[in-house]
Amino acid sequence: MQRKMSLSERFDSLLPPWMQEIRVEAYQKISESRFAGLCYVGNEEAMRLLIIGLWQFVDDFPHIVGRGKRCLTRLSHVEMHGMREMISLLRKTKKILREIQTDEEDHRNLWLETGRALGLIYPENFKQEPLPEVKNWIKAVDEESDPLTMFLKFAAIEIIAESISKHLIPSSNFTAVLGKRGCEWFRLHTVHHPGVSHEELALRIGFAFCQGDPIKNLCNATIQNIVDHFVIAAEACLTLCP
């Protein structure tokens, strides 16, 4: 009988190759959307509406990651997996999750820099009530979940950020509108620094809680659900765009 892998061993395992298929599907949805098309041609009004309309999520996400980090210390996980296993995993992930949360706070500031490049002033131009579609996206990401689902949703956010950035950065019309500093949020999500990406880290933490091999259909459904919520939210931001 094959020995059951520990949480730490599953965390250290390679990601399944079918994750690339999930990334491709997400990229296609995002790149073929109306909002991405308008940004690609440098439509400044559409870009302003998106920066303002999606702000509430960008502002909330570091706190969502923080709540996810604290979720791992729940007694229920200790009871299910054992104190020794959870301590071992937390030793591997505590610093990583703290760095991810800090990075997301930095990304929040870069989002505001993009707004400044478009003539927006914080906080004056960012006070509008979030659209229902944006609230639904936030709720979908933030609602209480088991660790696998929660970290799949975090990975989905990284996939979204990378997909829209890889689509828009090659557009000279887009980068001309924003300038160097205004493009920094997007450039940051197209560059892979040495080490493991936020997406991979989130997936590895989530897959550590899989009882067996990760199931492609389940993972894809969870990630694409968050991608779909994002696209709906972004499109809703353009309702005032001519």
Image: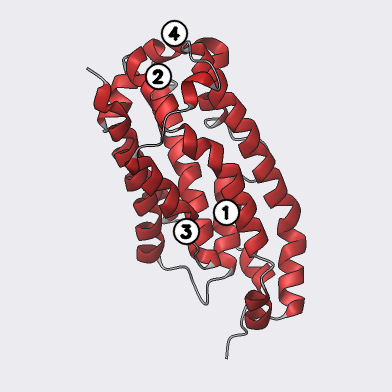
Distance, label 2 to label 4, CA atoms, is: 15 Å
Secondary structure under tag 1 reads: helix
Q: Nearer the viewer, mark 3 or mark 4?
A: 3
Residue type pointed to by label 3: Glu
Mark 1 burial class by Cα count in 10 Å: few <14, some 14-19, many 20+: many
Secondary structure under tag 4 reads: helix
Mark 2 burial class by Cα count in 10 Å: few <14, some 14-19, many 20+: many
Image coordinates of residue 122 in percent, x first then y, are 55, 20
Residue at image position (52%, 51%) is 154
**Which quadrant is the N terminus positioned in?**
bottom right
Distance, label 3 to label 2, CA atoms, is: 28 Å
The image quadrant of residue 170 is top left
Image coordinates of residue 181 in percent, x first then y, are 58, 14
Secondary structure under tag 2 reads: helix
Q: Are marks 1 and 4 in contact (CB under 8 Å)?
A: no
Residue that protrudes farthest toward the bottom in the picture = 1
Residue type pointed to by label 2: Arg
> Can you identify the residue that label 4 sits on?
176
Upstream in the sequence, badge 1 or badge 3?
Answer: 3
Residue type pointed to by label 1: Ala
> Can you identify the residue that label 1 sits on?
202
Upstream in the sequence, badge 1 or badge 2?
Answer: 2
- Here the colouring is secondary structure
Distance, label 1 to label 3, CA atoms, is: 17 Å
> Can you identify the residue that label 3 sits on?
143
Upstream in the sequence, badge 2 or badge 4?
Answer: 2
How many numbered marks, from 0 up?
4
Residue at image position (48%, 39%) is 57
> Can you identify the residue that label 2 sits on?
48
Upstream in the sequence, badge 1 or badge 4?
Answer: 4
